[in-house]
Amino acid sequence: MKHIPVLLDAVKQAIGDMRGLRIADCTFGAGGYSRAFLDAGANVVAFDRDPNVADDAMAFQEKYGCTFRFVPETFSHIGEIDGLFDAIVFDLGISSMQIDVAERGFSFRSDAPLDMRMSVCGMTAAALIEKSSMDELSQILRDYGDVKKANVIAHALKEKLPKTTFGLRDLIYNPNDVAPVFQALRIAVNDEFGELRRALSAVPGKLAPGGKCICVTFHSIEDRIVKDTFRGWTTPAGDVRLPVVQPAPFKLIKAVTPTDDEIKNNPRAHSAHMRGVIKA
């Protein structure tokens, strides 16, 4: 399936005129956001932990030259990059490229080793199931997939220790639980929420005055992490009943969800939310 960047028009509108801006694209993926930013006149620093995007990133380097820099790391490394950004953009979750390559083990629609590693290093999903206790596995399924019968499924996984995507799929009795179980294991394998929290903690120190942080989320928990973080940044310090209150360091940008037309053209956009803030 062709990769279609989700909520790209909303993100572009939130950033505004990009000519001469320095923008961090925190998930390069297939390069949809980076391309739009570069074509609009921005300088882009793009992050991605997935080594499979290296060829695309090199092609961008050849086309856009010094206006594009690729960092082959997780976006939590943004605090290590020199200088400030005018915009920092997070496109969270999993990319269509990762889902559509069967051997990556993200999808239950094709049989493949039970991998799910975005960075192609570290512990696979199969190893995670084997090394986790049943209580730990149940917690992962509940917290990251909202799986109702997490204990029952965790027991089945610990008993059979599936090594393939079909092996995992066939242990899940309720078809409605298949996608949530795969999602929960993927989030745990890649520490997606930990990465997000670490990256957001670095954002205030990496944005220039007037700079914008924009997040496109796809999962209720990651959306809550972003929403709660932004609420903290946009809340004045001190007692509002007193005459002196320290102004909030950020202002909210209006949240956006996909239109019906975007969802029709790109079903993967159905759960997306765009949230943003502007640094004072």
Image: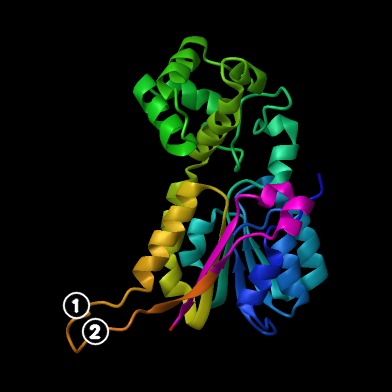
Q: Which residue is mark 2?
A: 245
What element does badge 1 sit on?
A: loop
Q: Position of residue 141 (x, y in %)?
A: 45, 30
Question: Which residue is painted at 66% across and 19% down in the image?
Answer: 166
Question: Which residue is painted at 43% across and 84% down in the image?
Answer: 280
Q: Which amino acid type corresponds to the residue marked 1 in the rendered image?
A: Asp
The stretch in magenta equals 255-279
Report the Cα–Cα distance between label 1 and label 2.
Answer: 7 Å
Q: Which residue is mark 1?
A: 239
Q: Are marks 1 and 2 in contact (CB under 8 Å)?
A: yes
Residue 263 falls inside the magenta stretch: yes
103 relative position to 75: left or right: right
Residue 111 falls inside the magenta stretch: no
Q: Residue furthest front?
A: 260
Residue 201 seen: no
Q: Which amino acid type corresponds to the residue marked 2 in the rendered image?
A: Val
Residue 148, picture quadrant: top left
Q: Position of residue 131 (x, y in %)?
A: 43, 23
What element does badge 2 sit on?
A: loop
